[in-house]
Amino acid sequence: MSTAATTIATEPIEKGNSLWHDAWLRLQKNKLAVFGLWALIVTTLTCVTGPWLMHYGYEEQNLDLGAVRPSAAHWLGTDTLGRDLLVRLLFGGRISLAVGLAATLVALSIGVTYGAVAGFFGGKLDAVMMRAVDIMYSLPFAIFVILLMVFFGRNIVLLFVAIGAVEWLTMARIVRSQVMAIKKMEFIEAARSLGFGRRRIIFRHILPNVLGPIIVYTTLTIPGVMLLEAFLSFLGLGVQPPMSSWGVLIKDGAEKMEEFPWLLIFPGAIFSLTLFSLNFLGDGLRDALDVRSSKD
Amino acid sequence: MPSRLIASLFLSLLVAAGCARKENPPVGTATALAKKILRVGNGTEPQDIDPQTITGTPEYRLMISLYEGLVALAPDGKTLEPGVAERWEVSPDGLTYTFHLRANAKWSNGQLVTARDFVRSAQRMLTPALGADYSYMFFYVGGGEDYFHGKLKDFSETGFQAPDDRTLRLTLRQPTPFLLQAMLHHAWFPVPIDVIAKFGGLDRKGSDWTRPANFVGNGPFVLTEWRPNQVIVVKPSPTYWDRARVKLDEIQFFPVELAETEERMFRTNQLDLTYEVPLSKIPVYRREQPEVLRTDPYCGVYFYRFNVQRKPFDDVRVRRAFALAIDRESLVKNVTLAEEQPAFALVPPGVGGYQSRHHLTGDIAEAQRLLAEAGYPGGAGLPKIELLYNTLEKHRTIAEALQQMWRKNLGIDLTIYNQEWKVYLDSQKTTNFQIQRAGWIADYVDPHVFFDLWRTGGGNNNTNWGNAEFDRLLTQSLDAKTTADRYEVYQRMEKILLDELPVMPIYFYTYTRLVRPDVKNFRTTYLDNYPWKYVELAP
């Protein structure tokens, strides 16, 4: 890892310092952020490839075996229906990570577009668009999601697209305020005087400059969405059995923690690790991308 | 709407109580024993304490302390003994029951419990405006059903008659051999009509008469305190005719919904008796403290309903394949854990001495063959199947286990999904499901209760299944001269059910609870309706 890091660190210096390169260097100095990045990569890869290497299916039961503590046959033990916890954890990870990514992407595309348009045009359009956001903010979130659930039925993909469609609100506000600051800068004036269209100005000239806050907020949205999925699974509205997700596993484990502690410890640990990693990475990125905060 | 009304009543009650009373300090074991205070975990906050309108088991357990019917349970928890009626006669044709009431049976306000009280209580029960769920338990008496449906206007023309204050005569529509058993049910308890009339009218649910200050009952205990979502306190009634046999000084009923919380309260000495035991705790108690864990048979069956009008369950071969392809022994041994009996018939073993002769038989190979015959070899070509259960950890675990058995044995991939209790009940009523988890706990100890369910178009059938021969036998069964003859008819009905399988039985319930060793003479009866008056506390 250290050799890889140093080669990346030294090579581009010869080519000159871009903003992104500076950010990358700053990020690398943040130990926690680097740790988070690697932890995420390892977790994701394991969840994606791991289940193919296992002997057990995630739904495969062994009722006579029941819940046993971690052993050579079942590295993380089994649950009360005799299902291998490791496999369920990896499968659950696929769901949880996919849900986090999918919902965040939806939130990202809606939020960024909406915020950029509102911020760029300003005036009445901005007022109307932002009041709409305020109204949606005021809806009780859990009830809203449950309603969507009723509307979309028990389709997990649709549900999390729907969550993404709710999560974009904050993103829209952040992007709007950034756009409002940037649109008054000279280089935008220059683009305008060159006769570029609004669309081109928004997407080619303004958005690249707000990418920092967007990336940071995105890394913070993913854990939020994953927590939300856990919360919905807790209510029985998330994924349906026998499929698992980290939220489902933690909920099950919490109910049985005194008798079968491993059912809570492992899913809890991996979930926390992922959330911490995302938060560390998000923090690191914020520091790294904020040019004003560190001029070194 | 009524529930909101009740809620606001509770609120005002809470405020009133809060002003007047100091918070009771939690009662530790030592004081509880010295004063003989029994602390009972009682599931949920009761809907009400009106025995005619309640439906749940937590309420039933309260009712047993506050009221007494014509007959009562003896200390053995099985046989009947006189309650308000000191003796009774049944006419040879089984159609007329004459009850002679005790001279010393009194309400808690000192008035006598008269035969007229029972007649007027029955009338209230059969008033459609009250909307009591258990009205049908009074249809056995002549004219009851007609009065309920408005075909009979004058209640004095029904079979409920009170020739004098101490004689109650019931004339039945047809012989009902289990009538006395049914009378143990809370729907048959008398209610203080005059008191109810004073507080908002007879056909109003949840009016003020059930407040501690207004409450009047005829049972061994009276209501002294009701703090919603905290505790209900009852104390021995000084006017109760059998006061000498009431051993406890006080019972406190705690509405604790979460089994885990309840178990923690039990462990920290805050409860003497729990309502249930968390599934994962049963093996722990069995291993470490077997003396406090009580597991007894409970008169009920856990089953899955098929909607026989939805594909593929319109085909009896598919229903049979589903019913045969699960391993019930493994399920009760490894998943439900409370010594339940795997169910291969519809009536729990030994209800009223009845033993099912016909059983669900066949192996997985037969299930596969049946499924292939129905046109779905190896599960191929089946439409999407969804299994509905109400949101509860235990139901989900069972459904997951069965889901996997069907997948393995029949190659069927079905989805399981949950609904909240009220939504679930709505789906049940409108038969908006393919397979639905359900259970039935008997209201009285007689096999009849498990057949009455499946009457064509019956309110609790909910499978769209009907069978004319079955209905005919159901009516015929009550005319049988002897119990043995009647049970013969039941056997034939059970055969029909097992041939047609509108439902697939899974297991027969047991009741598991924790009981502190200080609690003496407590039994879990078949319906969990053991009279509190026999219970004692002694170190």
Image (cartoon, coloured by chain):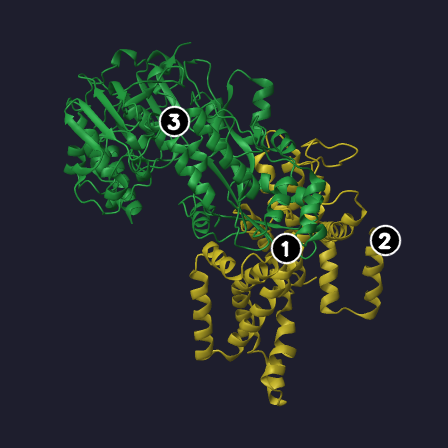
Chain colours: A yellow, B green
Q: Nearer the viewer, residue B477 or A218?
A: B477
Q: From this viewpoint, is residue B275 visible?
A: no
Does dot 3 land on a helix, a strand or a loop? loop
> Nearer the viewer's eye, disc 1 or disc 3?
3
Q: Would you name the residue on which mark 1 appears?
A: A283
Vertical comparison of B508 with A206: above or below: above
- Per the model, the C-alpha gap separating discs 3 and 2 is 95 Å
Q: Is residue B58 left or right of residue B100?
A: right
Q: Amino acid at mark 2?
A: Thr
On the image, the x and y values in percent for residue B358 come to 57, 32
Residue at x-position 48% and y-position 27%: B298
Residue A164 is labelled as none
On the image, the x and y values in percent for residue B418 come to 53, 48
Q: Is residue B327 left or right of residue B260?
A: right
What is the chain letter for disc 3? Answer: B
Q: Nearer the viewer, residue A54 or A5?
A: A54
* Image quarter of residue B71: top left
Q: Would you name the residue on which mark 2 appears?
A: A3
> Nearer the viewer's eye, disc 3 or disc 2?
3
